[in-house]
Image: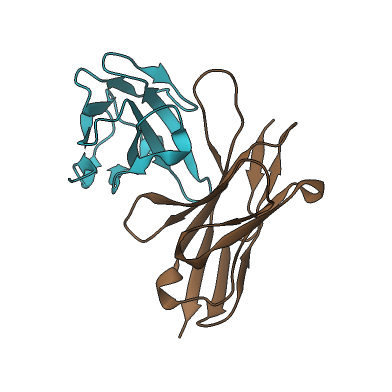
Chain colours: A brown, B cyan
Amino acid sequence: AQSVTQPDIHITVSEGASLELRCNYSYGATPYLFWYVQSPGQGLQLLLKYFSGDTLVQGIKGFEAEFKRSQSSFNLRKPSVHWSDAAEYFCAVAPFSGGYNKLIFGAGTRLAVHP
Amino acid sequence: NAGVTQTPKFRVLKTGQSMTLLCAQDMNHEYMYWYRQDPGMGLRLIHYSVGEGTTAKGEVPDGYNVSRLKKQNFLLGLESAAPSQTSVYFCASSIDRRIWEQFFGPGTRLTVL
């Protein structure tokens, strides 16, 4: 079955430190891959997406993610975290089934940022 | 341009009561979705619509009904609420089948006692 695993439920980093959030997926082929951010009390916002090609993709707010086929991973990174990055982050995959496109979400990683 | 709005923002129900959640979008999007978000489980799709007058089941449709009588509105109904339906409900819309480009509403927090 298709699934998305985010191993870290909660991460705390200091402002200015680097960040890496992990995401692993289980799927027979390479799906489309996404990262979303959810600020407190808000809906989800798309950070970045990977379809094919260059395995390092850039997104909004200074985030990037790297697709590694051999590890079935799509980890999210940011070189220097800002206090406003405190939020919950969701990895998602879109395995196509021929009908509507569906998204399978991971359980999320909640990021706290210390000043 | 309000984007996606949801009414109400909060609601408390007793077991067995019914209610309707309203989602409205002003972006002329064809596709609309209802999700529920539970701790440690990410978002799960309840129902979706690919256009006015259409609805389809998602991943967790049991206990919910939907209607899309107007293109801009997507209603989610709970006929007989159960404590298991305590959750945060999100509506979203997308211009076409590219579900990843969807815009989300702010959510409705529902508690069923």
Look at the picture and state if B36 lies above or below B47: below
- Which quadrant of the view contains residue B48? top left
- The residue under the point 55% across, 74% down is A12
Residue A49, position as x, y percentages in the image: 55, 47
Q: Quadrant of the N terminus of chain A?
A: top right
- Which quadrant of the view contains residue B111? top left
Q: Quadrant of the C terminus of chain A?
A: bottom left
Instruction: Tell which residue pokes out farthest to the right in this image.
Output: A70
- The residue under the point 71% across, 37% down is A30
Give whichever of B68, A82 is nearer the camera.
A82
Res. A72 in view: yes
Instruction: Tell which residue pokes out farthest to the bottom in this image.
Output: A115
Give whichever of B23, A75 is nearer the camera.
A75
- The residue under the point 29% across, 33% down is B15
Judge left or right: residue B87 versus residue B5. right
Residue A26, position as x, y percentages in the image: 72, 39
Give whichever of A69, B109 is nearer the camera.
A69
Residue A29, position as x, y percentages in the image: 73, 32
Instruction: Tell which residue pokes out farthest to the top in this image.
Output: B53
Judge left or right: residue B45 versus residue B29. right
Instruction: Tell which residue pokes out farthest to the front in this image.
Output: A53
Look at the picture and state if A85 lies above or below B47: below
Residue A69, position as x, y percentages in the image: 77, 46
